[in-house]
Amino acid sequence: MTTIRLDAVRRTFGAVRAVDDISLTIGQGEFFTLLGPSGCGKTTLLRMIAGFCDVEQGSVWFGDQRIDKLPAHRRNTGMVFQNYAIFPNLTVARNVAYGLRARGVDRAQIATRVEKALQTVRLGGYGERWPHQLSGGQLQRVAIARSLVIEPAVLLFDEPLSNLDAQLRVQMRVEIRQLQQSLGLTAVYVTHDQEEALAISDRIAVLRAGRVEQVGSPEAIYRAPETAFVAEFMGATNMLPGEAGAFDGTTTPVAACGHTLHVAGQVAAPGAKVMLSLRPETLRLVAAAAGGPCLPVRLQLREFLGPIVRLHMVLPDGTPIRVSALAGQDAAAMPEGDLALAYDPAQVVAFPAP
Amino acid sequence: MKSLGGIAAFRNATTLIALAFLALFLLYPLWLVLQNSLQDEASGQFTLQNFTQILSSPYYLGSFRNSVVAGALSTVLASLIGVPLAFCLARVDLPGKSALMTLASLPLVLPSFVSAYALVLLFGHAGVVTVALRAIGIPIGSIYGMSGIVIVFTLTLYPYVLLPTVAGFRAIDVSIEESGRNLGASRWYVFRTVLLPVVMPAMLAGALLVFIEALENFGVPSVLAEDKPYLAVDIFKLFAGESDSNPAAAGALSVLLVATTALVLLLQRHYLARRRFATGARRAPPAIPLSRPWRLAASVFSWGIVLLSVMPFVAVVVISFLRFHGPVLSWEFGLNNYASLLRGSYQPLYSTLLLASMAALLATLLGAPIGYVLTRHRTRLSGLLDVVGMIPFAVSGTVLAIGLLLAFNSGWLVLTGGWLILVVAYVVRKLPFSIRSASAIVHQIDPSLEEASINLGVSPLKTFVTLTVPLMLGGLAGGMVLIWVTAASELSSTIVLYSSKWATMTVTMFQALQGTGAGEAAAAASILIVFTLVPLLLVYRLLRRHDGSLL
Ligand SMILES: Nc1ncnc2c1ncn2[C@@H]1O[C@H](COP(=O)(O)OP(=O)(O)OP(=O)(O)O)[C@@H](O)[C@H]1O
Ligand SMILES: [Mg+2]
């Protein structure tokens, strides 16, 4: 139960700046996620907190204690590894007891705490089993119990669910979140799966090439991305290049793909090149005749995905654009004739063109 | 790294102790050999005369040429046998495949000069087969000299090519082959253009090992060369011979030998550094469906080669139970060879057991931490250790032993005449193997296991001792047995360094060979074979290596 503060930390490997002057403050009891594409430095940053990776510059603080010079085994963090890292030569109970024995806790207490930790992760009674007798999901739970039982200052997760199958992944992330909330632990979680990050976090930091691109709540990151990179990384979106016109007091007209879109607020100086992000689920298919802000489109392909239908459309100038619609409310139900996409000017996000 | 705590001290201590050990017992002796070769023997002045003398002597040039030619021929033949055999083992459904695999790796650990001696017993001047054939009027050619040496090298060293090539063929995912066939290529075409090039680096790495081993080997030419000059034998004679001793010339020849092997080793490293094909087979490719005649042919070929290579050892054991009348065998069974061998004393038996055990223990105690440090905590200094630690590969046992004699015959540290110098020689010679096998073991332990332990509050040093070492033990035991086995049958440095009190079984056998005790030599050879096989079979059982390979 600690706040974590990273102050301009940096780490280079050869010519690569894996972590490039990152500053973050993670609040007490917060579930904080580091999200980003492969190689962006998530693992490096996490390992700096755990003490497995030297901090070249800057400092790391737990509360008001500076810890970046403290050896890894004295930092009191509980880390859950991607491949579980369960000691194959110890039973489940001995695995969980490992950190307690290292701390010299007395035997009677170890036994009760281990059993309690195993019950917490719903593995009560599994103590005498050997690791090779457990499934992947169970091993991951042992790893979590092993980290919890030492009552760490912070919990660290490095892609803990990426070795599990899709269903188990969803189930485990709910369990991890509930555990963290009920114990009130500060947690730092690394993933490259944006859906997982959105589902589990209090706040997310999106990383790109060793730098923080944006920090914020899942809603803010998803709805109001500050950069085109974040917009694209947080799930499929339609990016349309355009040129801003003069702000009329409520919206800015943007000429894009042979049409004029209206974007809420003043997004850029007149004549500036911009990129517009239109999320597929904010677009609605309507008959061309209907009023309101909309774009004329032609249907190219329809993908049925169960709960939703993905429509692949093209604008008159040939630019592809994708739309997600709830099944039963899409083109199949549409009248013959010209189609259009209705959009909400408030949900269009504009970025300066690169 | 500061955050590594106690492990940094451990790493530095390991590196420094290992470097000190190698500097004292490898580099310093080698330096003395070099220095010796550049000195005038009488005056101690610097001179190149020893080299010019050798390079202008037809005898020594012949000796060098013979060694290189024998090495090259053996390498080619071992590859010609090894690659098809590897393909059969990897891809043909052979009867008794796992037994075949075990037998095929045996010649590597059985003492090769025993195989050479078996050839003499069977086909030598008074050999069983020679005599039998002569009796019915069929003369056979001499197996002494080049032909015999090449045959023995080929039959004892081909596993160096075979084992990595089998692994190579097994690591090629079947989809690669299928896509070739899918594109319209015949099986043979795919083999030639895809499979063979992919296993080529592994094969060549093995082939160069064959060459180096053949070049350095002392035992086989000393049994089979008769009068033909061979580098390894001449070095020994020049150094230790009673009549024609010339240590300076021995030094010059040694430098020549070490330079050649080092060059080959460097070529091998250079070549391999640029060629690695990741083929990531999820499982071994399936056996190729063959028609009955082809399958029969493959089985006969595979079993034929493997049995042929193991046969000499079987022959020696059988012959050791026969009675000799002088050099001539008679078909009476008995234990009298063993009786007369051990009548002298049991001391060689004890010496062998003791020295090999000490060597195996020390080489492991030294090599395992080095292997760990090199794999997990590389620094510039430990990088140096990586290079120095592989030098013993390039140094033949005879040359190392000569260097040790030069270094520790007088002065502040006198080791000659005792047991320690033998142990030192064995440890130095087996160190590369020990380091490599330890580092292979560490590679298989996921680093996150150690990190998890540290993360849970156990210091890095304690993690190493209480977690990593127990995880390594199984593999280390296997490596230790292999060191034991090869140290027990070590001849080339033993023969230079032993003192009568510490003569080993190999020395006994060597002396029996030189004298008239053919029967005793056979008995000694058989004891060596037993010494080799029993621990191997035990460890094989223990580790349950189902892939059948012993190495
Ligand atoms: N030990 C190392 N030596 C050299 N370079 C490294 C090392 N560790 C990381 N890097 C480099 O630092 C950068 C960041 O690596 P890092 O492992 O932190 O990425 P990541 O965000 O965790 O990626 P992934 O999602 O693939 O796990 C990469 O470019 C990587 O190649
Ligand atoms: Mg990572």
Image (cartoon, grey):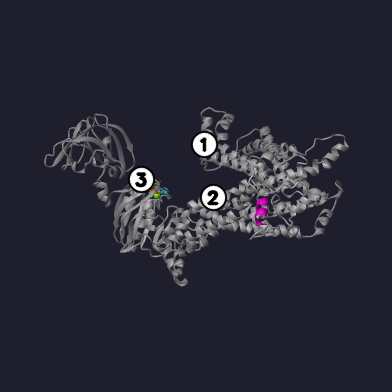
Q: Residues within 10 Å of mark 3 (few under 14, many from 20)?
A: some
Q: Which residues are magenta?
A: B401-408
For image coordinates 24% across by 29% down, the residue present is: A316
Q: Which residue is mark 1?
A: B175
- Which secondary structure, mark 2? helix
Mark 1: secondary structure: helix
Disc 1/disc 3 C-alpha distance (Å):
30 Å
Identity, as a three-letter code, of the amino acid under mark 3: Pro
Q: Looking at the image, is B457 positioned above or below residue B444?
A: below
Identity, as a three-letter code, of the amino acid under mark 1? Ser
Q: Is residue B406 magenta?
A: yes
Residue B396 drawn at (x, y percent): 65, 47
Choose mark 1 or mark 2, whichever is in front.
2
| Residue kind at label 2, given as amino acid type | Asp
Of all chains, the one bearing label 2 is B
> Disc 1 or disc 3, which is closer to the eye?
3
Image depth: mark 3 or mark 2 in front: 2
Q: Is residue A196 magenta?
A: no
Q: Which residue is mark 2?
A: B386
Question: Which of the 4 image quadrants contains residue B469?
Answer: bottom right
Q: Position of residue B389 (x, y in %)?
A: 57, 51
Mark with earlier residue (1, 2): 1
Measured as percent of width and height from the top left, residue B234 is found at: 72, 44
Q: Where does residue B515 sit, x and y in percent of width and height?
A: 82, 49
Q: Residue sitting at 55 percent across and 31 percent down?
A: B193
Q: What's the CA distance linking mark 1 and mark 2?
A: 37 Å
